Amino acid sequence: MVSNACAGTLQGSMSPEELFKNCTQDSEQLTARCFVGLSFVLNGKKQRAAELLNCVCANAKPGCDEYMLAASGLSKLKLRAPQTEASADNFPLVSSADKKGHQLIVIIH
């Protein structure tokens, strides 16, 4: 349900607020906030993107898909993901760019 609703929001048929209201579980909220935040990054809505992506990083488990995507979005905004004990100790991130300028994120175990 969330992936279809996220697609609807990204296509403009549903507002982000409607999407968030329809997400009843915490995991759905994180996924929705992650994708909406990333769409805001791409559309130049930096402040709102940072709010949503910081929320995802603060509430998602470090290393999960939503956390990694949100951290990448924050990196694109030149911001760092909030560090938790788990992320600082267990999942340090190293970020660099390849020869074509694509952002690479490596998790060091």
Image (tube, helix red, strand yellow):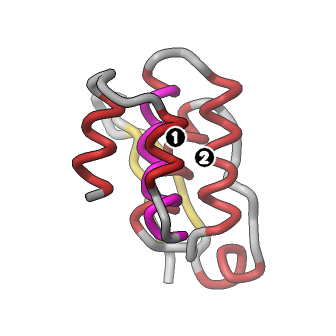
Looking at the picture, tell me which residue is in the foreground, 107 or 99: 107
Q: Is residue 45 above or below residue 38?
A: above
Q: Nearer the viewer, mark 2 or mark 1?
A: 2
The disc labelled 2 sits on which kind of residue?
A: Leu
Where on the picture, by quarter, is residue 42? top left
Q: Position of residue 20 (x, y in %)?
A: 52, 48
Q: Is residue 57 above or below residue 36?
A: below
Q: Position of residue 64 (x, y in %)?
A: 44, 72
Looking at the picture, tell me which residue is in the foreground, 40 or 1: 1
Q: Position of residue 10 (x, y in %)?
A: 33, 30
Q: Which residue is mark 2?
A: 53
Span highlighted in magenta in the image: 26-40
Query: Mark 2 falls on what kind of element?
Result: helix
Q: Is residue 81 above or below residue 63?
A: above
* Disc marking residue 98: none
Main SS type for the magenta part?
helix
Is 20 left, or right, of 1 in this rendering? Answer: right
Q: Residue at x 75, y 73 (%)?
A: 84
Q: Which residue is mark 1?
A: 73
